[in-house]
Amino acid sequence: MSQEAYLVENLVKIYPKNNVRANDGISLDIRWGEILGLLGPNGAGKTTLVKQLVGLLKPTEGRIWLDGHDVVKNPDIVPHYVAYQGQKMPLLVDITPREAIYYTGRLRGLSPRAARVQTDEFIERLGLHDFARRPMAKLSGGQQRLAHIAMTLVGNRPILILDEPTSGLDPEHRRLVWDLLLESQKQKGTTILLITHNVLEAEQVVERVGIVDHGRLLALDYVGVLKQQVDQRIRLEVTAKPGHEKALADALHSFESVRRINDLRFRIYLQKSDVSHAVRHILSDAIMGWINDYRVVPPTLEDVYFHFGGKEVSVES
């Protein structure tokens, strides 16, 4: 086994039709057994990079090594190692989730009995019982997403590449999915590459993170290491009650550094020694009636993202 699951060297992808440089000299490694996140806005070049990793696109320049195998020269090696869930789900019409999961397992080399066992397990774990025998075309987008996640997991591939895997899922099912993925990583040593523009989701699960924008890799390191490079002030985040945002904004003008995150949410940047005073101030009788919620947070992955030049990143939970 090679030291790295993947090694990418100076990857460039240019779309000749419009001369767009979707990837611009990207070099990175993905280590066995880790969860690596690729973070960036829509159009940053993340999906283009992934399609090259799984052999669906040929790079204009550069090399991709999968466990020491040259993916560019031998893309057929990828399915032996990798289960890939793309951002756009394949169109399955008449097949049911149970059939899709079972036959995916069989195609990945499971015996009929093992495929049935794993199919039953994922139907149970992901709560697919009520629609496991309905045609996929008749399922909601979220139900189809859960079925495709099960199809990705079945067969125990050592590497999972997931492009926006929980898009369209409610918080409960997002948590179910991440519990399964984290369990697979911890118990089986599964290597996971997560591609997302959702900062909060990424911060909860990744060990290292790469930040991509305009086709370039802006940073790659452990989350904690990257956080040490950003503004170390404490963040006091305050959310106004609807209709009281102007009054709250006026009341927060006394702080030296305030950023408005959206219509209702404000972020105050504070030295550690000033946090207690600031909390007492916003909890005063004059202000507390305008506030829905508040929280004190250290530097976040969102701060890292903006520090390295990213923009328009999602902060939705």
Image: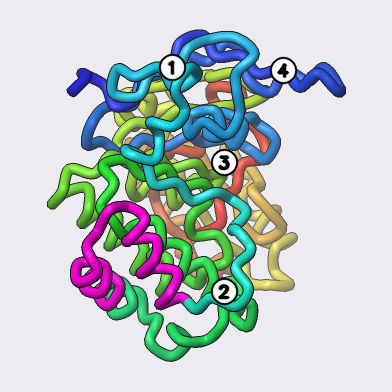
Q: Amino acid at mark 2?
A: Gly
Residue farthest toward the left in the current orientation of the protein: 187
Which amino acid is tagged 1? Val
Side of 8 relative to 86 (left or right): left
Residue visible at 42% across and 57% down in the picture: 295
Residue, disc 1: 8
Compared with residue 80, is residue 4 higher up or lower down, i.e. above or below? above
User: Marks 2/3: CA distance?
Assistant: 19 Å
Left or right of 252, for residue 102: left
Q: Is residue 24 above or below residue 303?
A: above
**Residue 172 lies in what quarter of the image?**
bottom left
Q: Which residue is mark 3?
A: 255
Q: Amino acid at mark 4?
A: Ile
Which residues are the magenta region? 97-121
Q: Who comes first in sequence, dot 3 or dot 4? A: 4
First in residue order: circle 1 vs circle 3: 1
Residue 301 sits in which quadrant? top left
> Could you tell me if the residues under marks 3 and 4 are in contact, i.e. CB atoms within 8 Å?
no
Give the residue at mark 4: 14
In the foreground, 253 or 95:
95
**SS state under label 4:** strand
- Between residue 284 and residue 21, name the one nearer to us: 21
Q: What number is the disc on residue 289?
A: 2
Please state, as top left, top right, bottom left or bottom right, where the N terminus lies in the image: top left
Q: Is residue 228 visible?
A: no
Coloured how?
rainbow
Image coordinates for residue 225, horizontal then vertical, percent = 31, 24
